[in-house]
Image (cartoon, rainbow, N blue to C red):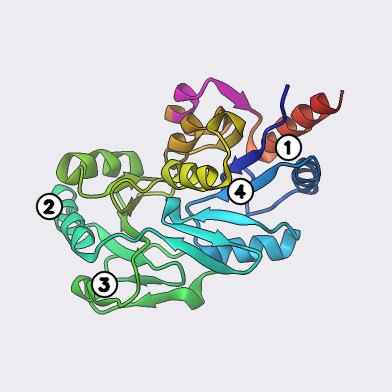
Amino acid sequence: MHPPRLIATDLDGTLLRSGGILSERTVRALRGAVDAGAEVVLVTARPPRFVDMLTTASGLVGTAVCSNGALVYDATARTVVETRALPVAAARHVATALSHAAPGLGFAVETGHQVLYEPGFGLRFPGAADTEIAVASLPDLWLTDVPITKLLAWSAQLDADFLLAAAEASAGGVAQFTHSGGAGLLEISAPGVSKASTLAALCAARGIDATEVVAFGDMPNDLTFLQWAGTGYAMANAHPAVRAAVSRHTASNEEDGVAVVLEQLFSNLRT
């Protein structure tokens, strides 16, 4: 059996325990995979600034696919090497369509460095107060002079699955819609931008085939790259749609499910 050349893993609900904790067992398993010749790529909805905090704490550096595929980030050099931005016109169109389909939504834009939010967007991200910038109104969101990596739509009453269905029905084809489990939070990227599309391009540039990739995830935004990878694992705590669509399952994030698989895989390769 040939060893995997690349390990692609989501962060929240997958690699990390509750509270953003990266366990010592998981760090050992990742380092063991790297020592055996595999590359580890973080594939996350999170922006680069969160990856920086994680790599500083763990000592693990490398490449990350951030913002659901909108950014490729070199965590070693702390540099964004590729951006797939959502056009402002598309973001405005989606916000208008969604406001009619699900009245009462609030909106924010993620730039990779900051979150700009209008008054209706009541969600705040823990530990990110210094990067969250209020604007006076929804039209002010479209005045940013930096690329939009994600448009965020939030509701205090409606769940993310409902918002996803409403977005597909009202603005399908204008943008890429998904969610990562945040309460009432929909994540919107440029058309064709997903974790899978960016990971596939990254692997192609490295000469790595999908069959040489092992992937881990738990939420609908992970489903594309779990199905693209030659071997994809859904976490025991995964969204029901992900568990149903992915045949291989591992233990939950609280039980270090990624480490469980990597320990077995790389142990088997040494025997």
- Residue 250 seen in the current view: yes
- What is the crowding at mark 1: few (fewer than 14 residues within 10 Å), some, or many (at least 20)? many
Q: Which residues are magenta?
A: 242-250
Query: Would residue 174 be counted in the magenta stretch?
Result: no
Between the C-alphas of marks 1 and 3, the distance is 41 Å
Of residues 139 and 123, the one nearer the viewer is: 139
Expressed as whole percent of the image width and height from the top left, the position of residue 230 reads 55, 28
Expressed as whole percent of the image width and height from the top left, the position of residue 66 reads 49, 56
Q: What secondary structure is marked by label 3?
A: helix
Q: Which residue is mark 2?
A: 100
Query: Please, which residue is most extreme toward the left here?
Result: 100
- Image quadrant occupied by the C terminus: top right
Query: Would residue 244 be counted in the magenta stretch?
Result: yes
| Looking at the image, residue 222 lies above or below residue 146 | above
Residue positioned 68% across, 53% down in the render: 21
Q: What secondary structure is marked by label 1?
A: helix
Q: Mark 3 or mark 1, which is nearer the start of the sequence?
A: 3
Residue positioned 76% across, 42% down in the render: 37
- What is the crowding at mark 3: few (fewer than 14 residues within 10 Å), some, or many (at least 20)? many
Q: Which residue is mark 3?
A: 141
Q: Mark 3 or mark 2, which is nearer the start of the sequence?
A: 2
Of residues 177 and 37, the one nearer the viewer is: 37
Q: Please identify, in this view, whether the residue under mark 4 or under mark 3 is nearer the observer.
A: 4
Q: Please identify, in this view, whether the residue under mark 1 or under mark 4 is nearer the observer.
A: 4
Q: Which residue is mark 4?
A: 41
Between the C-alphas of marks 1 and 2, the distance is 44 Å
Q: Mark 4 or mark 1, which is nearer the start of the sequence?
A: 4
Q: Are marks 4 and 2 in contact (CB under 8 Å)?
A: no
Query: Which residue type does callout 2 highlight?
Result: His
Query: Which residue type does callout 3 highlight?
Result: Leu
